[in-house]
Image (cartoon, grey):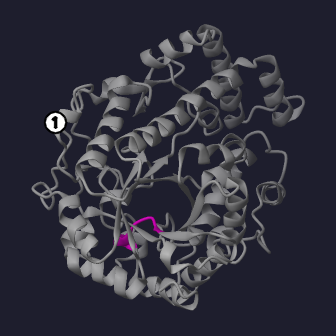
Amino acid sequence: MNTNKENKFVGVQISPISFIDEGVDTVLDTLQNRVGVNVLLIGTVSWLGLKSGRSVSWKIDGWPDHGIPEPFSMKGGAYFDPDPKFYNKTFIKKFKAQDKEMVNEDILKMVIPKAKERGMKVFIELMEPFFNYAGHGSATGVDIPNLVQCMEIDVFGRISSSPSTSNLDYRNWILSMIEDQVANYDIDGVMWCNERYSPLDQLFQGSAPGDFSRQFLIEANQRNLNVNKIRDSLKVMFEFFDNIKNGKKFVDGNFIEFFRLLFDKPEILEWEKFWLERNKDLDKEIYGLVKWVNPKLSFGLNVWNRNHFNLIRKIQWPWKEQVKYSDWVKPITYQHQSGEIFEREINIFGKTILNNLTKSEVTSVFAKILGVNESSLDNLTQRGLDPDTYIYTQCEDAVRGVENEADVYMGIGIDAPRSTKEQAKCTPDIAYRSVLATYKAGGKGIVLSPNYSSMKLSNLDGVAKALKELNIF
């Protein structure tokens, strides 16, 4: 069990608004002296309340025991002052947040000096997609003219709701605003999160797949992919899933029919693989950019919990590959919230290609394959997942997967937003056992997530209790 104080990494994800609401000194003193935090991961650019705002589930969870108990009409954008010289290769130049609470503030200038005085590290924390993300408290609008011209195009030629990461203006904007912050501020590192749905993932969820935008097609043609054939095959697969939704019965069942289509139209997987490679390339480019500007900075990947709850993503995102472009990884394991998330992922398959199995059967099979070692798989939403098994198993899996080439800092959920009142609640005991399970499984640190603005101090006391027992705080 690694409990070395010298290499301590006890982080917390935090919104700019918390520093405005409570004051920088108060927040830092509370986190450092009451909880034992020594790393701040600040959401500096976002149109999502989960990254930049107050609690996004206050109607269900109530307000925490700190901060301002009022909804935040977040406009979103950059909560630092963008330096114009970095944005010559993108039309996205003016994106400073216009929230009245922050419009004249630069969160990094506010926090970094005081954090350094206390010996605390500051990371910038960024997640793509930056806006229009269900369940994350998206801003009602994005005040960037012509942004719609960066959007993905689906298989039917329609503009989708998310920008194409191959669009040169959008991709260059991401690279530019990260370079801007890395070059201009005395930060200690970057945490990057990539949560995009692949074409196959979109099909399973009933959406028309992409990306058939101009730049992506240019890249596909450079790889000599037969785009017209791929488009026609994806339309057939979309019709297959649409037929399932409308109750059509296939002679040999959905599972056999699905794989029959894949065997008949392997270009579907060819497109999926190409999309996945380009998606991962963005992560690699950001890693290289950060290291080019400042090789001493630490770069971590905030890894989607769907990577261990979804069979397809588990296949597509091996740990061994991710350590080639990261110094550390943070598996998202928001344990009290995760029962509902696991059930949601199970339903993606249970209501489509595995609809001939009962929900209990699908759950048992997927739990076994994915290593979700719960003593009971009943009422997962209401119970949440047990930290002693779930956090431990996922941390052990990540530690084994990185093969000592990267550190593992577990993403511990503290009052992660719930979507229904029946969903399990966080407690001090859950927080306490989650921290202990992390270090017992070989993790080197923790990141309290997803946002301090929704965390109850009483639950954070459970974190402090565990850290003290481990002699880390």
Give residue 365's position: percent from left, percent from top: 84, 55
In-front residue for pair 74/168? 168
Q: Which residue is mark 1?
A: 84
Residue situated in front as seen by the camera: 290 or 434: 290
Is residue 308 or residue 205 the one in the foreground? 308
Q: Quadrant of the N terminus?
A: bottom right
Pinpoint residue 14: horizontal percent, then vertical percent.
35, 66
Q: How busy is the neighbourhood of tag 1: few (under 14 within 10 Å), some, or many (20 plus)? A: few
Horizontally, residue 93 falls left or right of residue 127, namely left
Amino acid carrying label 1: it is Pro
What is the residue that sits farthest to the right in this orientation?
252
Rendered residue at 78%/23% (across/down): 261
Whether 249 is drawn above or below 382: the answer is above
Above-or-below relation of 244 to 297: above
309 left or right of 324?
A: right
| Percent coordinates x, y for residue 182 in the rendering | 31, 48
In the rendered image, the vertical position of residue 292 relative to residue 345, given as above or below: above
Residue 22 visible from this viewpoint: no
Count of residue discs: 1
Residue at position x 77%, y 39% from top?
353
Q: Does residue 398 appear in this view?
A: yes
Can residue 452 be found in the magenta stretch? Answer: yes
Circle 1 — which element?
Answer: helix
Q: Is residue 24 left or right of residue 224?
A: left
Question: Which quarter of the figure has residue 51?
Answer: bottom left
* Residue in the image at 63% along x and 9% along y: 226
Q: Position of residue 341 (x, y in %)?
A: 61, 59
Q: Is residue 425 left or right of residue 51?
A: right
Specify the segment rendered in magenta: 448-454
Of all residues, the one furthest to the left in this rendering is 104
